């Protein structure tokens, strides 16, 4: 199979925030994942688990979304500040119906972001909170002078304001975030946006909560609602401060019903291919939302944000159904790699994406097991693709027919790829989704001399291979089968593999 890569035709920048993360008060993501408490025997800084921090720092994670998810619309931030022993408890009604003691709150989250070197993305409570509560939270976080909330922050031990670039206006308002229609939410989004003020030099990028999957109508209502405020970024009061981006969520879910989504580790080839049909649908859904936005905003001033994505399988047997703990196999890694290719192709509109979720929940990067830390196959895709952060996307087109498999009624392309350039180097990501057959790809690189090739591959004998605390089966290796041949870069991709090839595009 041959593909053409135009190395001298740089396209839109691939925003590093497409590699964003999501941490909700759900199961063992925050508690046990990020937060172990200061009295823990595990190495920690101020209660934050250091092996987790180090593993994520190695990914250069650009942002972290918190506190939810559905939890965000039940969260009252004042319960999570001040001395821990005085913080009231609450019930986490969405996730396991467990009692949340608010040990991890605003200060702990902001300390975590500082340790990670990640931008905070804070989601305000629109579902069960108040406009005043949201307004005071942002004042507490970002105001420098002697305002009431800045004073309260100082009393709680933090003198300097933090920087909060990303501010979510609720979450899934059509569902757990309030069961609203798009029109009702659109009005609320303007109201919350108006009172979520920029304090001092802190400029908020307000993200309105968006559609489920392909609900393009939701996006359209939010675009119409912006009206003359389209893309206004800086508060000037008087209702001009609305939102700068619109989100949507898309999970890769297979199975016959919500109660039977299939196992994360036990699946046959047919189920694998059906998973990939679902995963590759992201391309069409992104294009659908982008087309609606283009009609109202041809200059692309409003950003599209996919602030929850990833696989969602049945929980591991014997674990709390409300904790959404699932293992993570090579199949998950390939779901991630095809998503990133689609993200790169939509870099002109898509400004952020957040994997759900970072630790111990859904398609996690990391699993914790006592004092052991497991890097999942998905983690390695994020690591191998790091070179795409803030790089210029490059056009890559298949010549002729893309290999494919028929899956039920669907035609699944089994090859996916994308490329970018930064600092004089080109990075190409290549996925072979075929469960059984290797694929030889001849890359016709135009507009650059290919030098200094390095290549890495992620694969394993079985698609269900995964890593545990005692058995590491999915690791990144050097890809040997790469050669320059008559001006073509020939790469042999093993069956079910993800590879990256980098070179100096002189
Ligand atoms: O990520 C788990 C949940 O999925 C989130 O809380 C919610 O927003 C979505 O439905």
Image (cartoon, rainbow, N blue to C red):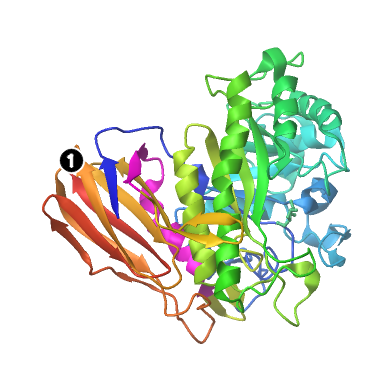
User: In the image shown, does 4 or 61 lie closer to the viewer?
Assistant: 4
Image: 336 above or below 449: below
Residue 297 x/y as whole percent? 59, 20
Q: Find disc 1 in the rendering and name its residue.
A: 448
Q: Quadrant of ligand 1?
A: bottom right
Q: Residue at x 65, y 72 (%)?
A: 326
User: In the image shown, does 312 or 359 lie closer to the viewer?
Assistant: 312
In this rendering, position of residue 240 left or right of residue 180: left
Q: Residue at x 44, y 66 (%)?
A: 434
Residue 397 included in the magenta stretch of the image: yes
Image: 332 above or below 316: above
What is the span of residues highlighted in magenta in the rendered image? 374-400
User: In the image shown, does 245 or 481 lie closer to the viewer?
Assistant: 481
In this rendering, position of residue 120 left or right of residue 141: left
In this rendering, position of residue 127 left or right of residue 37: right
Q: Residue furthest left?
A: 486
């Amino acid at each position: 199979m041959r593909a053409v890569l135009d190395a001298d035709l740089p396209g839109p920048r691939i925003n590093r925030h497409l590699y964003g993360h999501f941490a909700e008060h759900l199961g063992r993501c925050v508690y046990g994942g990020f937060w172990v408490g200061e009295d823990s025997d595990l190495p920690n800084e101020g209660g934050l688990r250091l092996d987790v921090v180090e593993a994520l720092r190695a990914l250069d994670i650009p942002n972290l979304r918190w506190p939810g998810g559905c939890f965000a619309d039940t969260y009252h931030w004042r319960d999570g500040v001040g001395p821990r022993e005085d913080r009231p408890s609450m019930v986490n009604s969405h996730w396991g119906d467990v009692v949340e003691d608010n040990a991890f709150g605003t200060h702990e989250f902001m300390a975590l972001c500082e340790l990670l070197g990640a931008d905070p993305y804070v989601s305000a409570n629109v579902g069960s909170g108040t406009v005043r509560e949201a307004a005071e939270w942002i004042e507490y976080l970002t105001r420098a002078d002697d305002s009431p909330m800045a004073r309260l922050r100082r009393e709680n031990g933090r003198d300097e304001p933090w920087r909060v670039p990303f501010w979510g206006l609720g979450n899934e308002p059509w569902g757990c975030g309030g069961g609203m229609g798009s029109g009702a939410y659109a009005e609320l989004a303007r109201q919350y946006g108006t009172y979520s003020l920029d304090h001092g030099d802190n400029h908020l990028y307000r993200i309105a909560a968006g559609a489920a999957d392909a609900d393009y109508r939701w996006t359209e209502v939010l675009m119409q609602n912006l009206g003359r405020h389209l893309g206004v970024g800086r508060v000037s009061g008087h209702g001009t401060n609305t939102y700068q981006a619109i989100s949507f969520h898309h999970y890769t879910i297979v199975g016959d019903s919500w109660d039977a989504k299939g196992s994360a580790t036990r699946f046959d080839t047919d189920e694998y291919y059906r998973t990939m049909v679902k995963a590759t649908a992201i391309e069409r859904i992104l294009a659908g939302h982008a087309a609606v936005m283009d009609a109202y905003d041809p200059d692309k001033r409003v950003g599209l944000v996919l602030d929850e994505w990833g696989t969602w399988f049945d929980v591991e047997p014997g674990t709390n159904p409300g904790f959404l703990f699932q293992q993570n196999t090579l199949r998950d890694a390939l779901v991630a790699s095809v998503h990133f290719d689609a993200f790169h192709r939509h870099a002109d509109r898509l400004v952020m994406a957040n994997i759900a979720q970072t630790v111990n929940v859904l398609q996690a990067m990391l699993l914790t097991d006592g004092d052991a830390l497991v890097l999942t196959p998905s983690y390695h895709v994020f690591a191998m693709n790091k070179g795409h952060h803030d790089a210029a996307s490059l056009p890559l087109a298949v010549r002729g027919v893309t290999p494919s498999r028929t899956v039920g009624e669907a035609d699944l392309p089994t090859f996916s790829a994308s490329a970018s350039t930064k600092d004089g180097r080109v990075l190409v990501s290549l996925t072979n989704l075929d469960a059984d057959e290797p694929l030889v790809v001849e890359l016709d690189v135009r507009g650059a001399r290919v030098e200094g090739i390095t290549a890495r591959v992620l694969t394993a004998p079985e698609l269900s291979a995964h890593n545990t605390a005692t058995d590491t089966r999915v690791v990144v290796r050097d890809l040997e089968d790469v050669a320059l041949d008559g001006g073509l870069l020939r790469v042999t991709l093993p069956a079910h593999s993800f590879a990256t090839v980098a070179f100096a595009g002189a």
